[in-house]
Amino acid sequence: MIARLFLHIKMGNIHATSTLAAAPICPKCHQRTTHDITRASNRTGNAGRPYYKCLPCDKFQCFDDDRGNDPRNPRCLCQVASRQQVAGPGKPIPRGLHYVCRSGKCNFYTVRRDEHEQQITVSEDVVEMLAKLNVI
């Protein structure tokens, strides 16, 4: 799994940081989301990362950068390539890889599975490196 991630990196698939053209609309309450930045003290690998949140729903919407974006990722319900992310250490499957809608416009979510149909996970010491390389 890690070897495949590095292969993608070596092939030049690291994307520069960019932002969405406009704040996404929450698919639940249909209100415009609010832009914010994660705290520098964030311990889940997202320190200083820009994101959108729906204030009326008090729900995280999406990150506002290109980390995890790859045109080969599965298409979300919006019919665009999804974003690959990693679950936090406190989730049911800690550090499990999954795909979500990159713009937060739909509720797409699917886990990344290996050849045995098990969710792919990454070790804690690899998470920061993959984040810096924009893989997750």
Image (spheres, helix red, strand yellow):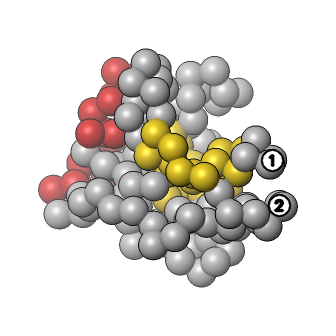
Position in image of residue 92 (x %, y %): 70, 27
For this orientation, the residue located farthest to the right is 29
- Between disc 1 and disc 2, whose residue precedes? 2
As drawn, is 64 to the left or to the right of 15?
Answer: right
User: Is residue 83 shown to the viewer in this render?
Assistant: yes
- Label 1 vs label 2: CA separation? 8 Å
Q: Residue at x 31, y 39 (%)?
A: 130
- Which residue is nearer to you in this view: 83 or 3? 83
Q: Residue at x 75, y 63 (%)?
A: 31
Check the image and report above or below for 40 versus 32. Answer: above
For mark 1, does the 10 Å Cα neighbourhood hold few (<14), some (14 to 19), or many (20 or more) residues? few
As drawn, is 11 to the left or to the right of 24?
Answer: left
Q: Secondary structure at mark 1?
A: loop
Q: Residue at x 39, y 72 (%)?
A: 71
Answer whether labels 1 and 2 touch (C-beta < 8 Å).
Answer: yes
Position in image of residue 20 (x %, y %): 45, 67
Amino acid at circle 2:
Lys
The number of callouts visible is 2
Q: Secondary structure at mark 2?
A: loop
Q: Which mark is residue 77?
A: none
- Which residue is nearer to you in this view: 53 or 5? 53
The residue singled out by tag 1 in the image is 57
For mark 2, does the 10 Å Cα neighbourhood hold few (<14), some (14 to 19), or many (20 or more) residues? few
Amino acid at circle 1:
Cys
- Which residue is nearer to you in this view: 50 or 44? 50
The residue singled out by tag 2 in the image is 28
- Which residue is nearer to you in this view: 47 or 102? 47
